[in-house]
Amino acid sequence: MKGPGIGIKATALFIALSVIPLSAGGYLLTEASMHELSSKTIEGLTDVVRGKANLYSEEFLNFKEDAESLSKYISNTWNQNHCNDVNRSYVWISPDGTGYDAHEDELKNFKCITDGFELAVGATSKVELAYFGTESGVLFFNKPVSPIIEELKPFEHRERPWYTTAKEKNDTIWTSVYVDANTKKLVTTVATPVYMDGEFAGVVGLDLLLETMQQDILDLKFADSGYAILVDNSGDVVVHPDYTARNKRWNETFTGENVLDMGSSLEEIGREMIDGKEGVKEITIDGKNYYVSYSPVHGINGSIAFFVEDEKIAGAMESLREKMYIGIIILTGAIAILGIFLARYITRPIEELTKGAEEVAKGNLDYRIESKSRDEMGILTDSFNRMVEELKNSRKRIKESEKRYRELFESSKDEIYVMSKDGRLIDMNKAGEELLGYTKEELLNMDAADIYEDRKDREKFIKEIEKKGFVKDYEVNYRRKDGKIITCLETASVKRDEAGNVIGYQGLVKDVTKLREAEKRAELYNSLMRHDMGNRAQIARGYMEVLKDTELTEEQKKFVDRAIKMIEESQEMTQKVRNIDRARDKHKLGRFKLDEIIEKALSSYIPHAEENGITIEYDGKGGDVIADEMADDIFSNIIGNAIEHSGCSRIKISVNDEKEFYRVTIEDNGKGIPGDMKDKIFKWGFRSRESRGSGLGLYLVKTIVESYGGRVELRDGKG
């Protein structure tokens, strides 16, 4: 039997020599290409998720800062600019939308609140609703939603999660997901407390519709596949593709998921997300393999996690590997070249993506990658370009926001500053330079204590602001560059890092030098006038007394007595004006016996009352009160008015202990006060047509009582 010919052997040998090394080389090259492709794909996935996380970190921090800025704005402008034109569709009175008149004083702040909303959120589409709820029950909105809430009443904002949590934690918070009463959709809220004069006054809230966040976050795709979730710092899932209100009412609790409870495969990743770590892991969910890439979102101390099925990434590579192996079998002679060509063809887009990610990381947001195909790599390239465009637009919006706040900063007529903890100026507006007489460059090289008249005042200021966290209308004297001393009122707050440590201060300074000088001049002129009037009245009275001792007719004596009476009333009025000024001034208060105060006032009027047939009853049950030496003027004026003008036969004084204060009731059985006079009797200079008094007595009563922190009331009814 004839064996194989030389040609066959040579062919077989050629085939053996070519197929084996080329197959091995093709195999090794293919496997190396697949490994590099997998590595580059994971890097690209990480870069996409990290970029989205960084974008949301900036946005959430901006929302948080917007809420805190709105809180400070309301605190600083409350009761500064009143307006009477209130659109009630922007206001709700909890719980049933009634009682607007009882909140008239708060509603006068409507203009300042709406201005604050405009400054804080403007026309941003991310914030669905901004509002400020007060502790007294008033709820201001930036949109006319009150008619909608009318259909839901009773609606009590002080029981809503955003209000109760911010109040309890006394800090800016992000709420868990809940059903919004206005839109009936799921929302999350950034809320921060508002303080006025050191007292809790309410809570500011900014609503972010969950579907807005879902649409944005869930648009995050990798090779046109996968889905994302947003998790807060406790593991609660804030954004999820399946989250809807599910016909829940606004006052029903919405129960979301926690990443730690979503299966053992997610528990390890969940803990790393809660710890703020970044990474990529392979896990199995419901029998399917997934790549999970996660990155921290610092604005809410949360994380974004992106899930993409393993087959979406590995499937394409496996399909390509099979085709290459088939090509090796069919085209043995060209397998090595084909393998190299395919490897280069596949890895080039990944290298371009890597280079693009590096350019974006350097800040070059104009960099784009040319899409040369419509396969998975082409789709990935398009996704990368869209992501960079979104980042560019976001940076543009942030710069515009910074410009808007900078214009507000520079246009202020009062000094605004930002300062480090060690007293070094970081920034100051033009008004601050003009106020102190220094250039900004000079101020940047100075210690803050250098501008104080007394350097010790700086130490007192630091102790006060670090103790409370803020100061309001803190009076201090500064020394200008030209040596002139100016008096200013400073409203400031501390800046803290994430650990709560003080890192600096920021505030507003108003020059009140001219106001203080005017007050001093007015007090000087007032004192001189009272002194001169007193002297002249005393001299005139002396002349009248001398004249009275001469031989006068009875009619002449009556005229002299009337003149003396007028002089005495003039002196009494001067003394009341002096007492009013003393009551208005800051004065030292002490502990006094209420019984002794009332008894002192009664001792002066009991004889006069008896002459008029009036009985005065007093049960004498008072304890200690905080007052000063003017306290008896309160009761002297009220009792004197009752004796002179009420036409009564009995005056009763009773004292009730209300724990925090004493309620003193003075009542008579006289003719009472006409209805048209009841809201006027405590005003300066008011007196009835038949009264000959100065109209200052009851005004003095009100001024003294309020200087003690109390109040005076007129009850309805005769007597």
Image: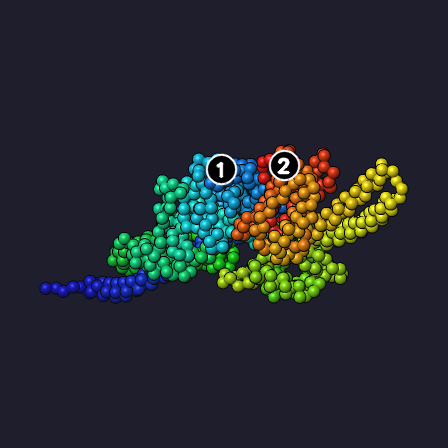
Residue at image mark 1 = 97
The answer to whether residue 125 is above or below residue 329 is: above
* Disc 2 residue crowd, few under 14, some 14–19, many 20+, Cα 10 Å: some
Could you tell me how far apart the alpha carbons at marks 2 and 1 are, in whole angstroms? Answer: 41 Å
Q: Closest to the observer: 546 or 48?
A: 546
Sort mark 1 into few (<14), some (14-19) or many (20+) by Cα contacts within 10 Å: many
Name the residue nearer the viewer: 4 or 484. Answer: 484
**Quarter of the figure with residue 18:** bottom left
Q: Secondary structure at mark 1?
A: loop
Provide residue 626's location: percent of width, then percent of height: 61, 55
Which of pointers 2 and 1 indicates the residue nearer the eye? 2
Tell me where residue 119 appears, x and y as whole percent.
57, 46
Give the labeled residue for mark 2.
670
Residue drawn at x 34%, y 57% as measured from the top left: 260
Task: Point out the image quarter for the N terminus.
Answer: bottom left
Q: Residue 364: tell me if it is visible.
A: yes
**Residue drawn 59% across and 55% down?**
624
Residue 29 horizontal side relative to residue 494, left or right: left
Which residue of the protein is positioned furthest toward the right in this rendering?
A: 551
- Residue drawn where x is 67% and y is 43% of the image: 610
Q: In the rendered view, does 229 fall on the left or right side of 129? A: left
What amino acid is labelled 1 in the image?
A: Gly
Q: Position of residue 288 (x, y in %)?
A: 28, 54
Tell me which amino acid carries mark 2: Gly
